[in-house]
Image (spheres, rainbow, N blue to C red):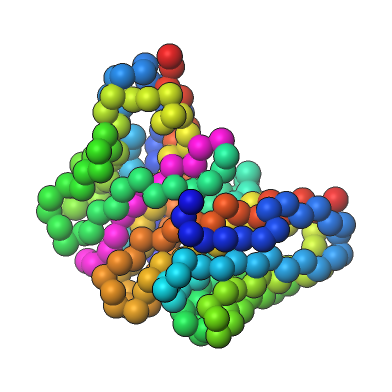
């Protein structure tokens, strides 16, 4: 069974600064996906970024980028130029690559506070 | 807006009752997933349907059941409700079907309170 670990329950960053959220996972699979989801106070789950395991290039979406280290089973999220709207709970998630899709296994989340 | 709709947004009911949560996936998505988010258990996968067929079950109680209809909307039925069933229930959808797109988009959730 896959497991996802987020070892930072809470983090804080000054507005406009950069912050990195950590995630490690454990799997015996070779084909899989990794995701970061954001859950703001509204409780909506918002997809931030995804990474396919077979791609060596790290994914980037505007101010969000990942550092994917497959051998180390590490998948960290870097938020650049932090904004107040980035304040949220961030969940790292894993899914296997299956033709019909696969469930997401989530970490326990990191609560990020952006200070003005 | 993810394109996934869930009704109702809030539900308050008593122990022992039965409720039905409804989900409409994004247009064209064949896969529907249900998740439960509670304070003590975090985000837990319940069940996955693909094009009307059950594909996987997670930590879903026997008191809970789900189905996906021909128009691809899905319903999650919760019966003999207990206080511990109070949680936020999410539906998510993804294309599936070998399209190469596997990210899941979440609905706004249904907040269930059992009193």
One can see residue B49 in this view: yes
Q: Which residues are magenta?
A: A29-41
One can see residue A29 in this view: no
The residue at 12%/53% (across/down) is A56
Furthest-left residue in view? A56
| Residue B50 at x, y percent in the picture | 46, 79
Nearer-the-camera pick, B69 or A32: B69
| Residue A69 at x, y percent in the picture | 18, 47
| Residue A23 at x, y percent in the picture | 33, 43
The residue at 53%/46% (across/down) is A44
Q: Is residue A113 magenta?
A: no
The residue at 87%/57% (across/down) is B14
Nearer-the-camera pick, B102 or A70: B102
* Left or right for B24, reference A31: right
Residue A108's place in the image compared with B64, above or below, is above
* Left or right for A52, reference B66: left
């Amino acid at each position: 069974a896959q497991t996802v670990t987020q070892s930072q329950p809470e983090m804080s960053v000054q507005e406009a600064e950069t912050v990195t959220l950590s995630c490690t996972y454990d799997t015996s699979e070779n084909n899989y996906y990794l995701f970061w989801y954001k859950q703001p106070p509204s409780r909506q789950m918002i997809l931030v970024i995804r990474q396919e395991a077979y791609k060596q290039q790290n994914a980037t979406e505007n101010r969000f980028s990942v550092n994917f280290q497959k051998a180390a089973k590490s998948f960290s999220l870097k938020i650049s130029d932090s904004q107040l709207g980035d304040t949220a709970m961030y969940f790292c998630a894993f899914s296997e690559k299956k033709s019909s899709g696969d469930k997401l296994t989530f970490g326990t989340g990191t609560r990020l506070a952006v200070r003005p | 807006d993810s394109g996934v709709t869930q009704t109702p947004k809030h539900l308050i009911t008593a122990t022992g009752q039965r409720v039905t949560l409804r989900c409409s996936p994004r247009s064209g998505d064949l896969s529907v997933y249900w998740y439960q988010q509670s304070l003590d258990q975090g985000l837990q996968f319940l069940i996955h349907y693909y094009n009307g067929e059950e594909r996987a079950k997670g930590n879903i109680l026997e008191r809970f059941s789900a189905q996906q209809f021909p128009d691809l909307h899905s319903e999650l039925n919760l019966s003999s409700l207990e206080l511990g069933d109070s949680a936020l229930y999410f539906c998510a959808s993804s294309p599936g079907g070998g399209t190469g797109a596997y990210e899941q988009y979440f609905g706004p959730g249904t907040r269930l309170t059992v009193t």
